[in-house]
């Protein structure tokens, strides 16, 4: 017996649970090992103290209550004094309560009243429930990109009964600069091809009556939004339009408006174009004479497919009609819910162009349940962003943030839009969005990280600007020095 | 041949009760009320609460006597019920620690003379009875101050005389763990009551 074995056996030796041979071997070791002997002395002393623990006498009054209950129970279980033949044939052990409470239901009730109501059971069930919900929810989160911090609501399919005004502006727009005024005008012959805009100009300048091309539902504010060319004008016009629609305008609208102005300055058409190669197969754009108002838009959506989101080129080229497979695909697609789901499938499969088309269709034709629109718009923007088309993406983000300010994914959208602006070199826009997003507790940490990232880009931008200015100044100084020498 | 009911096993008494014999149950009560009461009392430390819990244990046995399948000893089942009731009570009282009413605390410096002071104040013989009484209280206090997992093992072994294997079944841990807890409990008692070691050795 070594010291370890001896230590293990001490307790059993103390309480006489070792067999004779083991006990003798352990005692022999204890006599020869000083350390184990000391430990044995301590344990023996503790045992001596413990064995002197006085036992208290129990109360006697409890026994009466217990025995009363026991007698009642025994009386229930005891066989009857003069049982009839049927009862006599029954097993003696069969209790009366079992006869009364026989069946699965009685067992269940006893179970619920007994072990199922224990606190441990309740805690365990709560834990199981939480783990179960967690396991169910995790795969849902994994389907989305890391930036997606809000759940995607799978929609119920709805009927297509009308278009959506959410994807505005989506009308193809060709930009030209008026040589007289220096302002941007649309189309080669904007005054003829786009009487709506002319009418708006006239309405705003000379209060002239609108031409017939303007749909009955068109409002001055709707058109003023399109006509606005400066950030302030756009913001004010959209705010007026939103007020008429009972919407709440938030600050990002102004930020986006400024960003949109910057894009317009670069010659980008606002709300027109295609997704590139895929977009080239789209049908021709609707006649520009149709006013982009809700009723007119509804007729347009029901009669002709909507144009693509944008076209990088200034000149809008009519797209060829859809091919037969595409027509079949369009015919096979169901309501907004189905198209939304299809878009999500494409998005999860990283087919962002196809996803964008589906989300755009949902935004345009949301059906009776318009709750899908914000999420579809958000995913349209995300799809465009993932496809590398930041310019188109910021327009969708713009629409989302200006028209659905209370959308729960708005803080995420701000961060994503800021990323697009940063990539486009619009650093001030990106900063404004991130600073606004940082005020939201849910995304504050992410926004701060993006702000740090943006700060680096801003420093590099300043450094590059200073280097460029120095490079421009250097030849001038050299020329001046040469002139002085001459 | 008349059978002596005291010779009947616990399991046989319970079987008879299940068949309607209330006297069999009374024998069980008398057999277990004292060790169960002391196990509960040292666990919950309050006499009035121990009274209630003791009654609760037997009432549960009355109501659920048919749940006992005989896979273990009846004593194991009884102490499992008692232990669960004590644990429930401890959870309720976790924010309100109560000192034992039957064991006055001696841990403070101003709560009475030490053993050496007693012996110095009076003759050994004159104070011997007082020391014995004081030791009883100190042992009870030391047991109550054991960690809960050590205390229950100690009580089951010391009060009920359960084998370590049976204790493992009640507590739900391996037998070696039970032995370790028992060893720690005895070492704690030895340290807590070290000033009485000479007195106890004399008694041996």
Image (tube, grey):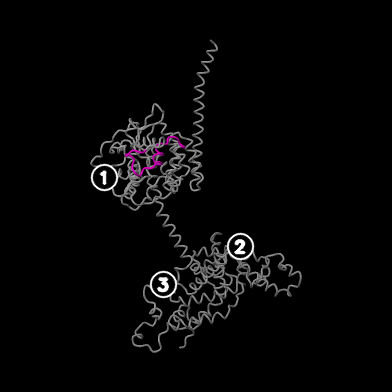
Query: Residue at left 40%, top 48%?
Result: A142
Magenta residue span:
A209-232
Among numbered discs 3 and 2, the one appearing first in the sequence = 2
Q: Residue furthest bottom?
A: A82
Among numbered discs 1 and 2, the one appearing first in the sequence = 2
Q: Which label was assigned to residue A37?
A: 2
Q: State which chain disc 1 sits on.
A: A
**Alpha-carbon neighbours of circle 1 within 10 Å: few (<14), some, or many (≥20)?**
few
Assign the N terminus of chain A to one quadrant of the image.
bottom right
- Dot in front, 3 or 2: 3
Residue B121 placement: quadrant:
bottom right
- Left of A443 or right of it: where is A368? left
Q: State which chain disc 3 sits on.
A: A
Q: Residue furthest left?
A: A324
Res. A389 visible in picture: no
Is residue A218 a member of the stretch shown in magenta?
Answer: yes
Q: Secondary structure at mark 2?
A: helix
Q: Which label was assigned to residue A109?
A: 3
List x then y, in percent, for residue B122. Answer: 76, 72
Q: Which label was assigned to residue A329?
A: 1
Res. A483 visible in picture: yes
Q: Alpha-carbon distance for marks 3 and 1? A: 57 Å
Note whether A404 is above or below A41 in the view shown.
Answer: above
């Amino acid at each position: 017996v070594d010291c370890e074995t001896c230590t293990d056996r001490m307790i059993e030796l103390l309480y006489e649970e070792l067999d004779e041979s083991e006990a003798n071997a352990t005692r022999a070791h204890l006599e020869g090992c000083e350390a184990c002997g000391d430990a044995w002395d301590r344990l023996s002393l503790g045992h001596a103290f413990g064995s002197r623990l006085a036992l208290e006498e129990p109360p006697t009054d409890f026994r009466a209550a217990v025995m009363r209950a026991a007698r009642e129970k025994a009386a229930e279980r005891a066989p009857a004094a003069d049982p009839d033949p049927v009862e006599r044939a029954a097993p003696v052990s069969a209790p009366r309560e079992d006869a009364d409470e026989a069946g699965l239901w009685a067992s269940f009730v006893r179970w619920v009243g007994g072990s199922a109501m224990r606190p441990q059971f309740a805690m365990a069930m709560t834990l199981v429930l939480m783990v179960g919900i967690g396991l169910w929810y995790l795969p849902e989160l994994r389907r989305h990109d890391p930036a997606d911090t809000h759940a995607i609501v799978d929609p119920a399919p709805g009927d297509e009964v009308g278009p959506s005004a959410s994807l505005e502006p989506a009308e193809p727009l060709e930009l030209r600069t008026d040589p007289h005024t220096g302002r941007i005008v649309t189309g080669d012959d904007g005054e003829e091809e786009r009487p709506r805009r002319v009418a708006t100009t006239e309405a705003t300048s000379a209060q002239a009556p609108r031409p017939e091309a303007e749909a009955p539902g068109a409002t001055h504010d709707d058109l003023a939004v399109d006509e606005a060319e400066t950030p302030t004008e756009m913001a004010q016009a959209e705010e007026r339009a939103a007020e008429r629609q009972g919407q709440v305008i938030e600050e990002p609208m102004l930020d986006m408006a400024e960003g949109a102005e910057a894009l317009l300055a670069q010659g980008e058409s606002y709300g027109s174009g295609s997704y590139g190669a895929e977009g080239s197969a789209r049908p021709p754009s609707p006649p520009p004479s149709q006013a982009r108002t809700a009723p007119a838009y509804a007729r347009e959506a029901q009669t002709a497919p909507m144009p693509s989101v944008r076209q990088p080129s200034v000149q809008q080229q009519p797209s060829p009609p859809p091919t037969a497979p595409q027509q079949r695909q369009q015919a096979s697609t169901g309501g907004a819910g189905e198209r939304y789901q299809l878009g999500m499938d494409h998005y999860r499969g990283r087919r962002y162009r196809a996803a964008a088309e589906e989300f755009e269709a949902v935004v345009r034709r949301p059906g009776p349940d318009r709750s899908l629109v914000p999420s579809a718009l958000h995913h349209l923007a995300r799809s465009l962003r993932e496809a590398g088309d930041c310019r188109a993406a910021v327009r969708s983000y713009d629409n989302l943030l200006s028209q659905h300010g209370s959308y729960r994914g708005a803080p995420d959208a701000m961060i994503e839009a800021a990323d697009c602006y940063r990539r486009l070199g619009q650093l001030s826009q990106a900063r404004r969005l991130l600073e606004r997003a940082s005020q939201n507790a849910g995304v504050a940490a992410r926004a701060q990280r993006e702000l740090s990232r943006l700060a680096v880009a801003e420093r590099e931008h300043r450094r590059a600007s200073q280097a460029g200015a120095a490079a421009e100044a250097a030849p001038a100084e050299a020329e001046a020095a040469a002139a002085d020498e001459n | 041949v008349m059978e002596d009911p005291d010779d009947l096993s616990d399991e046989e008494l319970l079987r008879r009760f299940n068949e309607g014999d209330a006297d069999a149950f009374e024998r069980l009560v008398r057999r277990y009320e004292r060790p169960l009461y002391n196990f509960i009392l040292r666990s919950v430390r309050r006499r009035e609460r121990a009274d209630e819990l003791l009654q609760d244990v037997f009432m549960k046995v009355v109501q659920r006597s048919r749940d006992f399948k005989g896979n273990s000893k009846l004593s194991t089942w009884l102490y499992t019920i008692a232990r669960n009731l004590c644990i429930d009570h401890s959870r309720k009282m976790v924010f309100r620690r109560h000192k034992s009413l039957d064991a006055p605390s001696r841990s403070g410096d101003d709560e009475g003379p030490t053993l050496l002071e007693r012996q110095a104040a009076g003759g050994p013989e004159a104070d011997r009875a007082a020391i014995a009484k004081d030791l009883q209280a100190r042992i009870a206090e030391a047991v109550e101050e054991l960690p809960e997992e050590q205390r229950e093992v100690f009580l089951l072994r010391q009060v009920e005389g359960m084998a370590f294997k049976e204790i493992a079944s009640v507590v739900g841990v391996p037998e070696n763990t039970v032995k370790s807890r028992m060893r720690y409990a005895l070492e704690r008692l030895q340290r807590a009551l070290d000033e009485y070691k000479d007195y106890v050795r004399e008694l041996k």
